[in-house]
Amino acid sequence: MIVYNVTLRVDEEVHDDWTKWMRAIHIPDVMKTGLFESYRMSRLLTAEEGDAPTYSIQYTLLDMNRLTTYQNQFATNLQRDHLERYGDRVLAFRTLMQVVDEG
């Protein structure tokens, strides 16, 4: 199992709109690609006072081939939509993880 993790730091001024848009539009659009098994949206609790809210969205995939398909066919447009809507008010970085054990 592969975990495609997107960590996002969200400016307070767009926070409410961003969380609504992510839940109603962006995450469903990612899931509609049919390449991901599930997702989890979490908020970082260990932020320092005054820090912008930080989220992690973890999408699970069965294999790297599905990730390659996502990146080649869907990621550019979905990321562009996010950037056009929020610009530098939401900073994102992406990481990949491989699940090695589950309980």
Image: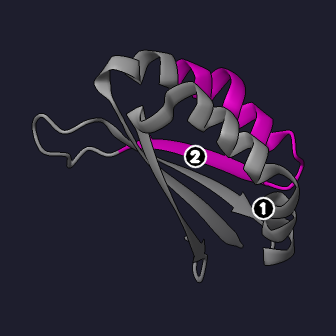
Gap in angstroms between the C-alphas marked 1 and 2? 19 Å
For residue 71, side relative to residue 2 (left or right):
right
Disc number for residue 71: 1
Residue shown at 55% from the left, 59% from the top: 5
User: Mark 1, mark 2: which one is toward the viewer?
Assistant: 1
Q: Is residue 28 magenta?
A: yes
Residue 56, numbered circle: none
Q: Is residue 102 visible?
A: no
Q: Earlier in the sequence, mark 1 or mark 2?
A: 2
Look at 82% across and 70% down and name the residue there.
68
Q: Secondary structure at mark 2?
A: strand
| Residue at screen point 18% across, 39% down | 51
Question: Which residue matches tag 2?
Answer: 40
Task: Please state which amino acid type lies under the numbered disc 1.
Answer: Gln
What are the residue bounds of the magenta stretch?
19-43
- Residue 2 placed where, x, y %? 68, 71
- In the drawing, does residue 7 fall left or right of residue 1? left
- Disc 2 marks a residue whose amino acid type is Arg
In the image, what residue occupies the spot 49% across and 16% down? 17
